[in-house]
Image (cartoon, grey):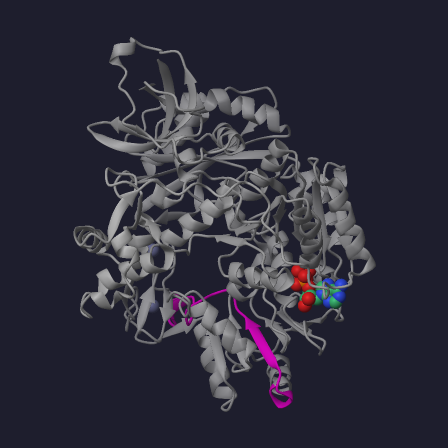
Amino acid sequence: VTIARVALDVPLPQLFDYRLPLLERDPIGCRVVVPFARSTRIGVIVECGAPRTAEERIKPVSRVFWAEPALPADVLELARFASRYYRYPLGPIVIGALPGALRRVRGEAGTRGRWLRLTPAGEGLLSVDVLPARAVARRRVLSHFLEHGAADWSALRALTTSAGRAVAELIRAGWVEQAQPPPRPPLQPPQRAARLPSARALTAAQLEAAGSVTRALGTFTPFLLYGVTGSGKTEVYFHAIDALLASGAQALVLVPEINLTPQLVQRFGARFPGLRVAALHSGLAEGDRLRAWQAAQSGEAEVVIGTRLAVFTPLPRLGLIVVDEEHDASYKQQEGLRYSARDLAVMRAKLRRVPALLGSATPSLESFAQARAGSYRLLTLAARAMTAPPAVRCVDTRGQRLRDGLSVQVMEQIDRRLQRGEQSLVFVNRRGFAPALTCSACGWAAPCPRCTARLVVHLGEQRLRCHYCGHQERIAIRCAACGNQDLAPAGHGTQRIESSLVDAFRSARVLRVDRDSTRRRAAFAGMQERILRSEVDILVGTQMLAKGHDFPRLTLVSVVNTDSALYSADFRATERLYALLTQVGGRAGRGEVPGEVLIQTAFPQHPLFDAVQRLDYPGFASALLEERRAARFPPFAYQALLRAEAHRRETVSAFLDAAAGAAAVGEGVEVFDPVPAPVPRVAGKERGHLLVQSTSRARLQRFLDSWHAALEEIDARHVRWALDVDPLEF
Ligand code: ADP
Ligand code: ZN
Ligand code: ZN
């Protein structure tokens, strides 16, 4: 009898043993149903071995999905690595790598069987009109069968919420029956349509970059592709992928934003007609996600484009991993398994011995330092492919009367774009109307009752809202401190800039793009369409608009109130501001007309702006690296942050003090004092943290081995804590 060690989605570090009475093939990576704590769960077999306790006390697995392809070895290996490195239980990582539809026992995994198909009688049906018109669910399900012949449960459930009843009725009518799942498509490269002859002639720099990647196929080689915005990094990806596909391999392309996925999928489609692309991101309906995942796993999809979780996708013929906008903070997951998908992508490339291509106009200092040290190969695209780089100017706001936060120069330039029928973008990094409601007499600002934060004025809904915890209340009419009734919104958010632009340019069509205006599903896609169709003159937007978009008629980008980042306590603030200004500025002038970027600031002499103007990322990054080296900050130190939260401040402090006490000192690891988090209270919870760091990654990891074990021993009944390895946010 074989004992299967099974990964389960439970917050415990160990694997669980079950008896495996029958072996149809190598069981590693197989999905199973197992009994667990009076119910059943989905698991994945990660190891096999001899029993660790008396065999008869070990329960048997309830079911093995022998017919399904197993999770491949490299995905399991990546999960193990992530578990060790980020100090997180293996079970949830492995189960988390499965699409949602495969994580549940009920449904297709249950006793009903996964697959259904038409019976011969069902195949004889000509249309769904055998069913009454009011039988909407049944008609929808039957129509799916008539089109496809067979279906799995998750696809049916994606059609209607009453799929279960509808199917039962179709079975009773004798039209549908349970069936074996169809055989997987063979793992061969599908026939490709002939390549379009119009594939672009690359510039010399693009050719050289693409050539380097192509020559490295089949080996683990990490590349950093540094290319200014508009330099044609995507064309380099395409070229390398083109060479890759010819050999029948698959490419994995990671992107930071859900919003960018459809655009990139389209570009792939235009460049490679007939290409089988699977998109994987959290915005997908469950059935679609399952299908895309299965297409990747079966080898049917040639290119998989996805957000960070896609780094765990099974890809039998993986030949190249691309990480676009590799500097982007959204590659780091901020809860649960706090992994960096960019870093795991490089690790996966290493496990599979394939190249990893990280691209950015503003590489993270971590990657840039790797390139300078020679461990990543640096590829450079120094010029835009087609258009001139945008002209960047600072607008000095000192001594100026701003009109609702906007300078005369910005207003003039917007006006000029309106005359010429071009588009302008005003970038504001705050949503809402104003970031605070303040008292003119005593300086009081309406606070969130549950957080150390001010409430943001949302004038449209006549509410004050907390952007940390979601608390909302009516707009106060008098000061809670002095009773004064003269309360005024302070500062400028997107809504305020929007309304001031609407006032100033009566005939202009102004569109605000932020999380509030794009809450509805697909709202953002609709807005992109309107922008591309020139139905918008002025855009007001947050980060959402900064990344990757290509709006050819957009020729002016204005940036307002980003000064706070220049003198922030966060050591990464200037790196981020540089990236942000470059990204958002890079939206300007991507069409025929050259672009212009105006940055409103009270510190026009700051060296950061100078570097942005000269497009001198390498110079700026080198200077920042010297500062980081002197201050012993990443990438010259490796950090782990112990985060803790509890209802009472004393509980947090006691836990963190105990944690500091449990740290074995010496051996080149620094343990800092526990401190309150930058926002000390969120949603009624006090937060604190404790930073440890070392100049050696290996030494830090060795320290964490013993420290993590010691942390588990501390009485933490009223504390929630987590280790964050390589933290990005403090
Ligand atoms: P990046 O991702 O580096 O910002 P893109 O790959 O989006 O740049 O390319 C910017 C624009 O330049 C796109 O419209 C693209 O089609 C065009 N482009 C890229 N390379 C070339 C080339 N070699 N010849 C002509 N146009 C190009
Ligand atoms: Zn007051
Ligand atoms: Zn709050």
Q: Quadrant of ligand 3?
A: bottom left
Total numbered labels placed on residues in the image? 0
Q: Position of residue 512 (x, y in %)?
A: 47, 74
Asked if residue 213 lies left or right of residue 713, the reply is right
Image: 432 above or below 698 = below
Asked if residue 408 lies left or right of residue 494, the reply is right
Q: Nearer the viewer, residue 433 or 511?
A: 511
Q: Position of residue 189 (x, y in %)?
A: 60, 45
**Residue pushed farthest right?**
204
Q: Nearer the viewer, residue 512 or 400?
A: 512
Q: Point out the image quarter for the N terminus.
A: top left
Q: Residue at x 28, y 30 (%)?
A: 717
Can residue 130 be seen in this snapshot?
yes
Q: Is residue 41 magenta?
A: no
Q: Which residues are magenta?
A: 418-443
Image: 417 above or below 549 = below
Q: Quadrant of residue 722 in the image? A: top left
Q: Quadrant of residue 427 in the image? A: bottom right
Q: Nearer the viewer, residue 641 or 176?
A: 176
Q: Position of residue 196 (x, y in %)?
A: 69, 63
Can residue 14 be seen in this snapshot?
no
